[in-house]
Amino acid sequence: MKRFPAFIDLNARAAVIVGGGAQALAKARLLIAAGARPRLIWPSFAAGLRAELDGKAELVARPPAPGDFDGAGLAFIAVDGDADAEALARMAKAAGALVNVVDRPELCDFTTPSMIDRGRLTVAISTDGAAPVLGRKLRADIEALLPSRAGALADFAARYRGAVKARVAEGERRRFWERFFDGPVAAQVLAGDEAGAHETMIEAINRPSQEQPEGVVHIVGAGPGDPDLLTVKALRLLQGADVILYDRLVGEDILNLARRDAERVYVGKANAHHAVPQSDIEARMIALAREGKTVVRLKGGDPFIFGRGGEEVDALRAAGVRVFVTPGITAATGCAAAAGMALTHRDYAQAVTFVTGHAKGDADPDLDWAALAALKNTLVIYMGVATAAKTAAKLLDHGRAPSTPVAVIENGTRSDQKIVKGALADLPALIAAGRIEGPALLVIGEVAALADGQTLLSLVRQERSAA
Ligand code: SAH
């Protein structure tokens, strides 16, 4: 450690900033965020600074004088090029203030770290001025892992410190708090359900300490495949999971982002055969949560779009297990972005409909084909490759033009993404010529013409030249 980190209470001390421009404003913002009312001293202040700091800081429009630093705890010299920063620093130091000179580490008594501000919870990173870019990068990494409501969680814990001290025996307290931060109460606070969290917390405090720890299940959307399309929250939950139950659509590159010692359980389906029946998956999650585990149920795309996430929530709730849902980017929006095709491009569509090609145990769902065939409606069909010929025939029967553009996107957003496009009348031929085998979406409607991808004609030509 090159410098001593400390968190300073600025309510009790004056903080002085010398300067009137952008640097001074940046320091003032930091001090105000820490609850201070800084005093800025400089002959002139930028108009933007005046406007922003109005009522939040004291502006003294004259050159600084030695007496200005009397009683100041911290002083920032935030002046530009021509001013004599060194002399100003000397003046402040002579009055006993700790001094920071912007961009002059050799003159600094203290430096300002890269910071993450979550209210009561603060993370500060220093490289001793050696590599500020590294500091900022680490800050971004930690920022991604730290829930945005982490400060609220610290506040929540602060409110119960006394009660926990009174009700939980000393030897048990540490374990109590560990369970608290891993368990359902913390999950509720982080999800924004403070009222529910208070209820659960009061139950927990009043429960004898030897009782079963309570686990929690997070049903998490993993997005369409590209790991960069995970949500920040999904990433954080993966890093905090004890057990991850994942589907076939979730790739290795996403699983590798999980905590290294998390247990991984594959519960996906191989082809059309159900490797693990849905009821077993649900029973397993319930059992793991009852063991006190933090379970992440990781599902492709968004858990509530054709993902059976709804059934899983029902089963967990019925078993009294706390369950939280984190949305993901669904295949339709992920694939549309990857194909450069706006699903509701104003010129072509006023609606978009997500349809499954497979309803519950039924390969030919009883859909309202007339409505689906309506003009200016983009149809996105999930799990629709096997039934594509039927779908095309139904839409044609209900008046959709044979020339209606279609696009088939396989493994969208992944490195092996494939897009083929053509006309509705040729949909089965397109799928055959494109050799579509992986998870794929059908997009039917005028916007499909906008997709980047090979046309049926070019596929057929390719086929011929290969033969
Ligand atoms: N919950 C998921 C969908 C599950 S159903 C979601 O929100 O995306 C599975 C179907 O989703 C697949 O048969 C396929 O039609 C579609 N799908 C999922 N990922 C896909 C991808 N990367 N590219 C194309 N289609 C995909």
Image (cartoon, rainbow, N blue to C red):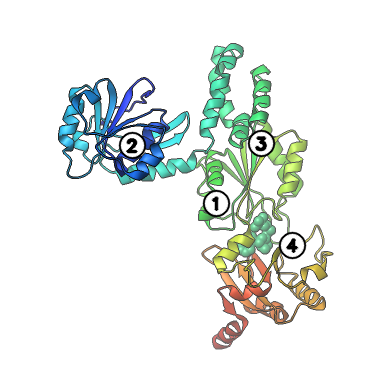
Separation of residues labelled 2 and 4 (CA atoms): 55 Å
| Residue beneath disc 1 | 230
* Residue at left offset 19%, top offset 34%: 107
Relative to 338, 364 lies left or right? right
| Residue beneath disc 2 | 27
Residue 12 coordinates in the image, percent (x, y): 36, 19
Give whichever of discs 2 and 3 has the lower sequence position: 2
* Residue at left offset 25%, top offset 33%: 100
Q: Are marks 2 and 4 in contact (CB under 8 Å)?
A: no
In the rendered image, the quadrant that contains the C terminus is: bottom right
Give whichever of discs 1 and 4 has the lower sequence position: 1
| Residue beneath disc 4 | 356
Residue 318 vs 443, above or below: the answer is above
Tell me if residue 270 can be seen.
Answer: no
- Residue at the right extreme of this rendering: 366
Seen from the viewer's position, the closer of residues 22 and 308 is 22
Give whichever of discs 3 and 4 has the lower sequence position: 3
